[in-house]
Amino acid sequence: MADTATNLEVYKLLVEDVREARRARRELSNVFMTLNIAGMSALGFLASANGLPNPVLFTLCAIALALTCAIWRTSNSYYTVLLAAKYKNIYAIEDDLGVHPIRDEWQNITGKRRAMKWWSLERAMPILFIVGYAVFFAVQVGGWDAEAWFRAVINGVADLIRDAGILF
């Protein structure tokens, strides 16, 4: 067991390390977000009248962008595991110090939003982009009539609501 002064110095280093890891995760997410926005623009150009009407090129770009999203999601998971390990070390030092400011703050925050833990925007964005690429691919290459499909879904839901007597 180290003395209090040593624990306090290690605590400061760990807190700073967490701050740096969170910053790195945020910057990496910004890079992936920018890459995917540019990729979506490229797919839009390829699908336009002025673009290159080549379904193979469009397909390869969509697959590459979906794989980029998978890497993005994996990176997010890595940082989640890394930060959990860092916080575990911080909590152990807090136990030695006899005060728990970071643990208490985290419990106050997560107590109110624990159900939202798995639905953060950071976790959802790669999946949303993949879904977007799949829909874009289905419409452009597969000839899927998205408008007719969505209209059928909306009409079906409206019929269910009407039959249940909820509205109308």
Image (cartoon, helix red, strand yellow):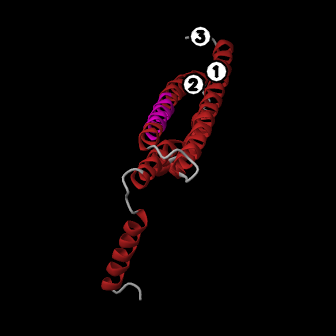
Q: Are the residues flagged by discs 3 and 2 in contact, CB closer than 8 Å?
A: no
Disc 3 marks which residue? 2
Amino acid at circle 3 = Ala
Magenta stretch: helix, strand or loop mostly: helix
Q: Position of residue 65 (x, y in %)?
A: 49, 38
- Quadrant where the C terminus is found in the figure: bottom left
Q: Judge whether residue 153 is colored magenta.
A: no
Span colored in magenta: 62-78
The quarter of the picture where residue 97 lies is top right
Residue 145, above or below 94: below
What secondary structure is found at the residue carrying circle 3? loop
Mark 3–mark 2 distance (CA, rounded to whole Å): 14 Å
On the image, the x and y values in percent for residue 76 come to 51, 33
Residue, x 55% and y 49% (percent of image)?
Answer: 44
Any mark on residue 74, and which? none
Identify the residue at horizontal 36%, vertical 74% (top origin). 157
According to the picture, the residue beneath numbered tag 1 turns out to be 11
Q: Is residue 77 magenta?
A: yes
Q: CA distance from mark 2 to mark 1?
A: 6 Å
Q: Nearer the viewer, mark 1 or mark 3?
A: 1
Check disc 2 and report its element: helix, strand or loop. Answer: helix
